Amino acid sequence: MNHFKKIRIIIISMIFVLILSACSTGSGKSNACGQSGNKFVFATWAAGEELKEFNEIVDRVNKNADGEYTIETLSIPSDYYIKISTMIASKKTPDFFWMTQELISKYSKLGAIADLTDLMENSEHLKPEGFYEGVIASATYEDKHYGIPWIANPLMVYYNKDLFDEAGVQYPSPTDNWTWEDFISVAKKLTTEKKDINGNKYRQYGTVVDGWPNIETFFWAGGGDIIAENGEDILLDSEESLKGLDILNEILSSNITPSYSEVSSLGSNNVWFEKQRAAMFMGGIQDNFEEKLAKLPAEEKFEIGYAPMPVGLDGEAHAFDWTASTVMAKGCSDNETAFKALEDLTLEFFKWKIASPLEGQVDQIAEIDPLKEPALETIQHALQIARSANYVPEWNEINNRLWVELYTGMLNDPDKYDYRAKAKEIAKYSRDLIEKRK
Amino acid sequence: MPKQRVGFYFILPWLIGLIVFTIFPMLAALYISLTDWSIIGTPNFIGFENFKAVFQDDMFYTSLFITVRYALFAIPLTIGTAFVVAILLNNKIKGSGIFTTIYYMPAIVSGVAVAIVFKWVLDPNYGVINSILAIFKIDGPNWLYDPNWVLPSYLVMAVWGASGGLLTYLVGLKDIPRELYESSDIDGANFMRKVWHITMPMMTPIIFYNMIMGLIAAFRKFTDAYILGGAGNEGTFYMVYLYDQAFSFYNMGYATALAWILFIIILSLTIIINVTKKYWVHTG
């Protein structure tokens, strides 16, 4: 066989092998857990200062483990989920990785992450009942726990006490219930025309709603929801849910919030509160207004007040909570050392991040960040009423429609947009999606 | 060593690249489009179910409509703009080199940077365009925040970036024989007549090339659309929808079917334009 022929054969074989590999069913061996000497890889989206702190914690945990295991950090600061999913596809799943609550049902349904229920039940420190109910629910799918929450960030209402005093409006209670009607009424009183030091006119708004808070908040405000707890029934077109959208529409159409297109002119929504252009802001602990204010010059500072999220038409207050959890690769399910490493590291996270998702650790917040001391009472209340949506594997598709079509439609044209009809249309789409899963 | 074998060795590195990075991914994509693969799960062969589902999907038609509508306006606009700018720059005027560089700049600026700049340019309250309109007492539109103004917003961006094809037009213009203009001068032709009867026909091969490239670019519009979006669904171009299906909704099989359909659409339109070539492209 001559040389030329050989090369042609090699090339043709290469194409053939590549085609075969493309058509493989992916049933190859999945990656083992803690591959050599209980060395575990932990993927995080942390970067910069957060990554530095993260690595310090990992080093401390590794030192305390005294050779029983070693944790290695894998920082993925951008395109996090694309890289994680690609790693899973190529059988190189990190042993542990952070995951936002919206994706846990999806990843568990696809068999990529381990069921931690038994491991958590048998754990001394991470028993599911030790977490705030609404927080642990965010890492639970079909009654199984797939993630260990390491942070809780429920919504509460921050308000500017100085602007309240100026308008002669009474402060809301830090823990007692106020209704959405009360909230809107207060926001109207705080919306007024003002002049800056140069004599230029500007409008001070009662609050800011620009897609934040998320739409779940308003479905709950009406006593409704998007998806029922069973993960199958779509509720977003129920009368209660539609009444919640009426509340959102009232906020948007009564000029108590800057228009959607106006909000970005200051950079982002929370800047409106920092610059005293909005008197109230529905935000989480992570908005960290206390620290931002501490850095401002004296003449720009103001006193912050804290109130819980208003009570919905069902008589209950619901504070949307964003929780991130650590999940474990499916391949680590039976590895007790892996869970031990995860447990040790998570307990350190609780001393690092606020708020801890474990009950009874609110006082720790002031130790980590003394500036938050005045907010503790409200944070405690917010954690008790914290909740997230009932996430299902189809959540991203449904939520995308809710945002792109429903919420932005309302934001762009609050006076004319037929949001009730759109909600019904998206409900039908969502039911079709869920039906396919069944 | 025979000549053809030497040639083969020379193209071998390219050939390997073509197989590994083009042919293999295409074949893999063809297979994936016939599965329910989600990236993180195991793919199951489902035949043509993804393709059937695509044709029953409202968002497929919506995103395709948005993309086709954009292409219909953007391609003639960008070709026209680049052509006119090239004719102006082709005249021997002072500083034309600097203007050429300036006009060509959009072609080398990152799409992400362009999107971020245009987010500010099109800002309804403090953007450059509305601020200029305000000087003339005109209330500017809400641009990307108003569903009716999303397409014009993207067309403004397209016109700004139209000079990407500028160099090809300039090269084409310089290739037109001077004698043609000289003889038309003797015949008393004015500037417009020369453009219409000499420049345009002689430039049709370049226009044809830019039309094909513009068509492909319009159907593959992604970066700025992904960053800027647009009110309602008006910013959901075909590629944005495809990306969402693959990486936000984890429907890689479905997304790959969308990619194949896009490939067929672009291929068909390119063939159609090629067929019409003999009627309007001057190749003599």
Image (cartoon, coloured by chain):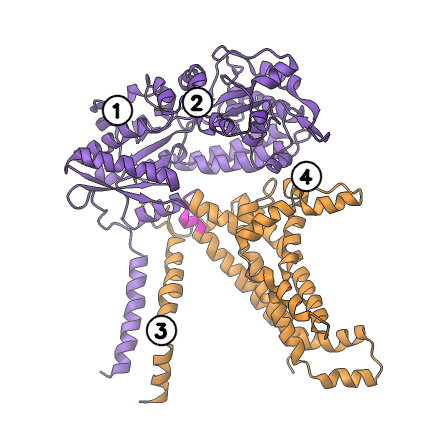
Q: Position of residue B5 (x, y in %)?
A: 34, 84
Real-space Cα separation, disc 4 to disc 1, in angstroms: 50 Å
Chain of residue at mark 3: B
Helix, strand or loop at disc 2?
Answer: helix
Please tell me whether residue B234 is drawn above or below residue A202 in the rendered image. Answer: below
Q: Amino acid at mark 4?
A: Asn
Identify the residue shown where x is 47% and y is 12%: A175
Which residue was labeled with disc 2? Answer: A371
Q: Position of residue A39 (x, y in %)?
A: 19, 42
* Residue farthest to the right, as pictured: B188
Whether residue A90 is in magenta: the answer is no
Identify the residue shown where x is 63% and y is 43%: B144
Helix, strand or loop at disc 1?
Answer: loop
How many residues crowd mark 4 within 10 Å: few (<14), some (14–19), many (20+)?
Answer: some
Q: Amino acid at mark 2?
A: Leu
Which residue was labeled with disc 1? Answer: A126
Real-space Cα separation, disc 2 to disc 3, in angstroms: 63 Å
Q: Amino acid at mark 1?
A: Leu
Of labels 2 and 1, the one closer to you: 2
Quarter-of-image position of residue B159: bottom right
Chain of residue at mark 2: A
Please tell me whether residue A419 is drawn above or below residue B89 in the rendered image. Answer: above
Near-viewer residue (A85 or B141): B141
Helix, strand or loop at disc 4?
Answer: loop
Q: Which mark is residue B13?
A: 3
Real-space Cα separation, disc 1 to disc 3, in angstroms: 56 Å
Near-viewer residue (B196 or A37): A37
Real-space Cα separation, disc 2 to disc 4, in angstroms: 35 Å
Q: Supply the letter of whichever chain is purple.
A: A
